[in-house]
């Protein structure tokens, strides 16, 4: 039996699984890695089927389930859905199918935004995300559940995704696109702005300059890392032991394992732009029908 399909109960030493539609989820990986240096991570970027942000509910659910099954087959102790679109559309389906705890990025991002605006007389929160995330209303619903009186405004900013991948973080073109997208948000004058897409933290500076210093930016990835730490502690799955390694732990080192469904070379190049390092362990895989493959190997 191949090691990848051995079924054993996860423990504190087991890795944390993360998936995204592609490379953007590396911003969430970075937040988790920085907050939880004793943990190991298995990351799956579904680069063959990116983008998710323009796809239908049924398609995103199917992709998300296949990705989750692939990661579950690697013996992870917790699954982080780094992709905002998959978190917005597919979390209930994933939770119903995967026998481990699943954390999405929407709830943590929304709760953090509510926390930082709690003292405002008339709290206003803006959310920028993909078209599918905005259409799902997942952030707005989650914010309203936590604080009914909050006013919420949402805007899709699809061009931010390729701009981040090109590393156009300070170009004048990026600034004028940001001004166009964020125009209405500036008029809305929010207390906080949620970066509700994996790629947007890469453009944090230009977004902050455009909306002004008075608006608190919420990085959903960082908010998620905080909640993951608390959940691991609550479940007794927090790895308190320093990992044994000969060098100082760093992003993309060989304790973390990266998988992509296509174009590994491009993933490595963009990873270097996002994280300043290329993954030491990077493999191309197929995730379609992993559940069937797993069953065949077991029986
Ligand atoms: N990862 C996606 C998200 O956070 C952005 C890219 C895509 O559309 O797939 O929503």
Image (cartoon, helix red, strand yellow):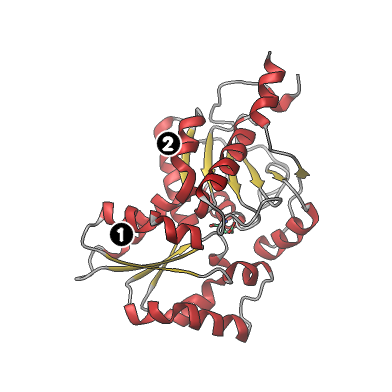
Q: Which residue is mark 2?
A: 233
Distance of label 1 from label 2 (alpha carbons): 23 Å
Lateral position of residue 173 relative to residue 225, left or right: right
Of mark 1 and mark 2, the one earlier in the sequence is: 1
Q: Secondary structure at mark 2?
A: helix
| Residue 129 in sight in this render | yes
Give the total number of marks visible in the rendering: 2
Residue at 67% in and 51% down: 49
Lateral position of residue 77 relative to residue 135, left or right: right
Residue count near mark 1 (Cα–Cα under 10 Å), binned few <14, some 14–19, many ≥20: many
Q: Is residue 297 above or below residue 283?
A: above
- Give residue 13's quadrant in the image: top right
Residue at 61% in and 40% down: 67
For ligand 1, the image quadrant comes to bottom right
Residue sitting at the far top = 299
Q: Residue 238: x percent and y percent?
A: 49, 35
Q: Residue 162: x percent and y percent?
A: 64, 69
Q: Residue 206: x percent and y percent?
A: 53, 78
Q: Which residue is mark 1?
A: 114
Query: Of 99 and 279, which appears nearest the observer?
Result: 99
Mark identifier at residue 168: none
Q: Secondary structure at mark 1?
A: helix
Q: Is residue 253 above or below residue 100?
A: below
Disc 1 and disc 2 in contact, CB within 8 angstroms: no
Residue at 52% in and 61% down: 197
Lateral position of residue 140 relative to residue 155, left or right: left
Residue count near mark 2 (Cα–Cα under 10 Å), binned few <14, some 14–19, many ≥20: some
Q: Residue 1: x percent and y percent?
A: 75, 18
């Amino acid at each position: 039996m191949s090691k990848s399909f051995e079924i054993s109960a996860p423990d504190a030493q087991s890795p944390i699984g993360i998936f995204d539609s592609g490379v953007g989820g590396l911003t969430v990986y970075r937040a988790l890695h920085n907050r939880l240096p004793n943990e190991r991570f298995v990351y799956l970027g579904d680069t063959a089927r990116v983008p998710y942000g323009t796809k239908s509910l049924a398609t995103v659910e199917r992709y998300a389930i296949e990705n989750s099954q692939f990661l579950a087959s690697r013996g992870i102790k917790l699954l982080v859905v780094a992709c905002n679109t998959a978190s917005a559309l597919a979390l209930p389906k994933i939770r119903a199918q995967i026998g481990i705890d699943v954390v999405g990025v929407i709830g943590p991002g929304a709760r953090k935004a509510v926390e930082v605006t709690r003292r405002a007389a008339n709290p206003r929160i803006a959310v920028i995300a993909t078209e599918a995330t905005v259409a799902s209303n997942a952030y707005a619903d989650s914010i309203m559940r936590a604080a009914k009186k909050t006013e919420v405004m949402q805007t899709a900013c699809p061009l931010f995704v390729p701009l981040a991948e090109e590393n156009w973080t300070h170009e004048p073109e990026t600034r004028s696109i940001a001004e166009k997208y964020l125009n209405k948000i500036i008029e809305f004058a929010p207390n906080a702005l949620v970066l509700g897409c994996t790629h947007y933290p890469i453009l944090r500076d230009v977004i902050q300059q455009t909306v002004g210093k008075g608006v608190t930016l919420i990085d959903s990835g960082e908010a998620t890392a905080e909640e993951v730490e608390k959940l691991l502690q609550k479940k007794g799955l927090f790895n308190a032991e320093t990992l044994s390694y000969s060098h100082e732990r760093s992003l993309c080192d060989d304790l973390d394992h990266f998988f992509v469904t296509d174009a590994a070379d491009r993933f490595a190049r963009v990873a270097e732009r996002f994280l300043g390092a290329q993954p030491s362990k990077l493999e191309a895989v197929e995730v379609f029908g992993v559940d069937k493959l797993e069953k065949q190997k077991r029986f």
